[in-house]
Image (cartoon, helix red, strand yellow):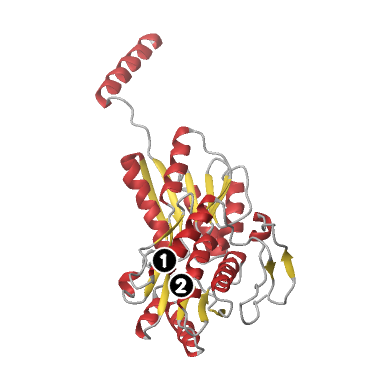
Amino acid sequence: MKLGFKKTLGAMAAVVGLAMGPQVEAAVKVGFVYVGPVGDFGWTYRHDLGRKAIEKKFGDQVETTFVESVKEGPDAQRVIRKLAASGHDLIFTTSFGFMNPTLKVAKQFKKVKFEHATGYKRAKNVSTYAARFYEGRYVVGTIAGRMTKSNVIGYVASFPIPEVVRGINAVARSARAVNPDATVKVVWVNSWYDPGKEADAAKTLTDQGADIILQHTDSPAPLQVAEQRWIWGVGQASDMASFAPKSQLTAIIDNWDQYYIDRVQAVMDGTWSSEDTWGGIKSGMVAFAPFHKEIPADVMAEAEKIKQEIADGALHPFQGPVIKQNGEEVIPAGEVLDDGALAGMNYYVEGVEGQLPQ
C-alpha cells in the first residue's frame, strides 16, 4: 500500500513536470544604492545609466532595483541590509560614505556579493571600484589654463576627500604646466548634490575673478551660472551641454556601463571574486563629452595629445616633481606618485589658493 502510494506520487510528479516544461533559471537580482537622485544629471545619473545597460544586455536574465538619495551612515546600512535580505545576489553601493555600512552588512550576508565605489576596504565578498577621474581633469586643466584670461580657474568642490583633492590638484598642475600664472580657487559646499549651494559657490568664484568653472558636484547648477555669466565651464559625470550649450567646454563622463556588465556576467558564470578596479582613460571608464567648437584648434590638439599620452602611459598627471602648496617637494622629477600616495592625497599642490579643510 505504501509502495503504491509512492508510485502514484511519482507518476503525478512526472505529469506535473511535463506540464510545467523545463525549469527556468531564476534571474540574477542586482541592487544599487545611490547617494543622490537618479535625475541629478551627474554621479548618480551615470550609475543609473550603467544599471540600465545591464538590463539592456541581459534582458530577463536579470532583475535590477535601486534606492536613490540614501544618506551616508546608518540610513545606508539599513538600505543595504534590506537589499541583502530580500534575495539580491549582487549589490553596488555607489558612494565613498557607504564603505563601512557595506562591510558591516557583508559580514552578515556572506553569500551576497557587494561592490563598493571609490572605497579602499575589501572583504571576501566585497570588491571595490573607481575611475581615475584625475586623468580627465588633467586634460581639461590644460584647456582651462590655455583659455583663461583672468588666470583664475574656479572649482566647486563637494567634500575634502582624496578623490576630490586629486581632481583639484590635477587641474592646477596641468593648467600651470601651460600657463604658470594660472591659479585655482576652491569653494567647498559639503554636499554631493545641492543645486542651490553649488550655484552660490559658482557665483562666489566668478565674483572672485574666475572665468572658467569646474566642479566635483553633481548638479548642472555651476554650469548654468557659467552660462548666465558668459564664461566657460566643464560638466561633471555626464554631458551637461543641454543646460549650458554656450558655455560647456566639455564634460568628464563617468562610464560604468561595461564594468557593471562584466561584473554581472562574472556572477552568472560563477567567476566573481573580490578585487580592486581603478580604470581611467585607457579603459574607457573616464570619457569626454564633445568638445566645444570654439576651443582653438591648437589648444584642442594639445589636449588630445595629452589625453592620448595618458592613455598610453607616456604621461602621468602626478609625475615629479610634485610640489605642495607650501613649497615642500612630495616627489622629485623622474618619479611618479604611486596609487597608495594618490589614494591618500590630503594636500594642495602649488597653484591652489586657500586652505584645505581638515
Rendered view: 204 above or below 188: below
Quarter of the image with the C terminus is bottom right
Please name whichever residue, 309 or 1, is drawn nearer the observer in this view of the structure: 309
Q: Secondary structure at mark 2?
A: loop
The answer to whether the residues at label 2 and label 1 have Cβ atoms under 8 Å apart is no
Residue at left 68%, top 65%? Answer: 321
Please name whichever residue, 118 or 135, is drawn nearer the observer in this view of the structure: 135
Residue at left 37%, top 56%? Answer: 49
Residue at left 43%, top 39%? Answer: 265
Rendered view: 7 above or below 198: above
Q: Is residue 101 left or right of residue 203?
A: right
Q: Which residue is mark 2?
A: 193
Q: Secondary structure at mark 1?
A: helix
Please name whichever residue, 119 or 126, is drawn nearer the observer in this view of the structure: 119
Q: Position of residue 52 (x, y in %)?
A: 35, 52
Spatial separation of the CA atoms under disc 2 and disc 1? 30 Å
Mark 2 burial class by Cα count in 10 Å: few <14, some 14-19, many 20+: many
Q: Which residue is mark 1?
A: 300
Q: Position of residue 142 (x, y in %)?
A: 50, 69
Residue at left 60%, top 72%? Answer: 160
Mark 1 burial class by Cα count in 10 Å: few <14, some 14-19, many 20+: some
Q: Is residue 280 something one can see in this rendering?
A: no
Rendered view: 51 above or below 239: above
Find residue 222 and report its image quarter.
Answer: bottom left
Q: Is residue 205 something one can see in this rendering?
A: yes
Please name whichever residue, 190 or 310, is drawn nearer the observer in this view of the structure: 310
In the rendering, which numbered label is found on residue 168? Answer: none
In the rendered image, the residue lying farthest to the left is 19
Q: Is residue 72 left or right of residue 344?
A: left
The amino acid beneath tag 1 is: Met
